[in-house]
Amino acid sequence: MALTKNPNVLKWLDEMVALTTPDKIVWIDGSEEQLKGLRAEAIATGEMEELNQEKLPGCLLHRTLPSDVARVESRTFICSRNKEDAGPTNNWEDPKVMYEKLGKLYNGVMKGRTMYVIPYSMGPIGSPFSKVGVELTDSIYVVLNMDIMTRMGAQAFENLGDTSNDFVRGLHSKANVDENERYIVHFPEDNTIWSINSAYGGNVLLGKKCFALRIASYQGKNEGWMAEHMLILGIENPKGEVKYITAAFPSACGKTNLAMLIPPEIYKKKGYKVWTVGDDIAWMRIGPDGRLWAINPENGFFGVAPGTNEKSNPNALASTRKNTIFTNVCHNLDDNTVWWEGLDKNPPKHAIDWKGQPWDGSVSTEKGAHPNSRFTAPAINCPCISDKFNDPQGVPISAIIFGGRRAKTAPLVYQARDWEHGVFVGSIMASETTAAASGAVGVVRRDPMAMLPFCGYHMGDYFQHWLDMGKELGGKAPKIFNVNWFRTDDEGHFIWPGFGDNMRVLMWVLDRCEGKAEAVETPIGYEPKPEDINLEGLDIDLDTLKGLLDVDKGLWKEDASGIEEFYQKFGSKLPKELKAELETLKKNLD
Ligand code: OXD
Ligand code: MN
């Protein structure tokens, strides 16, 4: 039975049913009874495996095809009516041409299959930030993951109401999982996402990157808010006051670890605490008080498993101990649990690897878990989840942090002089490739605000939107900072310990926001006085810290030419403010 009377939903559903011709339609109401049935069905068909219910209650294991284990940027499209609106950093096709091309692939694709109709809310039910989506899919794996990652079920339709047309239309079919016909396509002007021939999370959980970043960034530009690839965390001081920070990093820079940071002893014993609001996405609006407020639109964590352990991120690990779906990890057959590289030093001998092959960790030279294997874990499992996680008003943001992985150029931390300079700092975000990836080491990849793969429109317009938001926020705008945990010594070793000790840097950031710490002016912005970063209990002396804060003018001059070249991509859409900031940087370096 239909869960809504909304004619806009019903009309669209009719069209999609006519196109894909499923044998059966199941409306997902989100009830435990229904989900239980779906889990049992997925286990019976072998789509998912039930793990040890004593050690990992409610946990399931799933494997995708070896050719379908990651997001595919080359097959991700932004189909705006005008090519110019997608910009130089997105793949584009004319929407008419794309609908026709994909229409052929979707034609009859669900014959013999069931279509699940998933209503969901991104953001807490009833929050002014929240938005409704409906995903149609032929995959139970998608339904069960959407249940963890979003507020899924009948409530979302109640939020939408009986007449609104403001919902995101998502159509997914795994089809034959043919990588040559795989498409992840966004039609921002139609509030529509079409995904076909993949079953991997990032391509098929349409609430996440597709809606909450690509479509939402476009909506945010038009409606005056921001959808960002940012974690949100709160730091509570001994008086019980909590200040909130958002932070954007390209992948493989430890975003989930920072979001769930464990304070060092010196702060813990004084009574400081860290609370996680989100680990991947922030939706931000100007509140009635004129400040910037943020929610995490998601309801769970879709985290990378390898490297997650009791030391690197005990909170993330604890989050995965119940009601979690594991994808492409190693299956330990001895006790029917899971394992991945970097979990501990005891790889199972009697196991099945991520490709579904027998695997013996004591002899195998192959990996047991795929490097991009994932856990989908409910946010409420996280021991440090913020009590504001479900707050419809979100949390007020004091500071925005950008960061990347730079061996020598960027210092441990610096503060932008003002909002416009901060937008410049975000726009020049970059990471250097490491030996872990194929290709040359040390090549600089620009990834403005960590949004390059996720911005649903022209990045020049996106920079302009940031500048416009700053004008509206005026004196109430959060302060903007840049951090780099990855400076290395001459032997290539990291100098800064990272992980929990990053809190020492966050404390300076908050002190600056409250006008409690001083700063020194450098050619690139404000830096801490070395003695203002608390090093108590650390094996780092003041001279080493001075080294971490050093600004090498030669390297920065090289970087400035790199920025100039990168900026050329955006042509006349590059805001003049950013061009002026680049000129200021060059002048400061002379
Ligand atoms: C993610 C990503 O999965 O950024 O969060 O790729
Ligand atoms: Mn991400």
Image: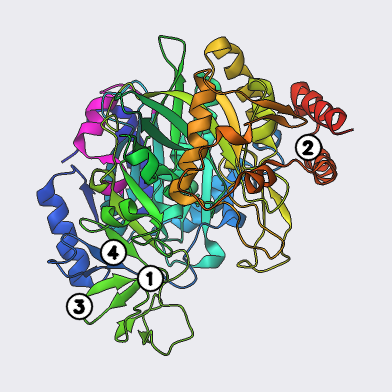
- The circle drawn on residue 5 is none
Residue bearing the label numbered 2: 567
Asked if 226 appears above or below 376 in the picture, the reply is above
**Amino acid marked by disc 4:** Gly
| Residue bearing the label numbered 1 | 340
Number of residues whose C-alpha sits closer than 10 Å to that of mark 4, classed few (under 14), some (14–19) or many (20 or more):
few
Give the number of the disc on residue 335.
Answer: 3
Quadrant for the N terminus, please.
Answer: top left
Instruction: Give the mark nearer the N terminus: 1 vs 3.
Output: 3
Visible residue check, residue 27: yes
| SS at circle 2 | helix
Nearest the camera: 483 or 87? 483
Q: Mark 1 and 3 residues: CB-CB less than 8 Å, in contact?
A: no
Nearest to viewer (mark 1 / mark 2): 1
Pointer 4: what residue?
112
Tell whether 218 sits left or right of 421: left
Range covered by the magenta-colored residues: 146-166
Between disc 2 and disc 4, the foreground one is: 2
Question: Is label 3 in a helix, a strand or a loop?
Answer: loop
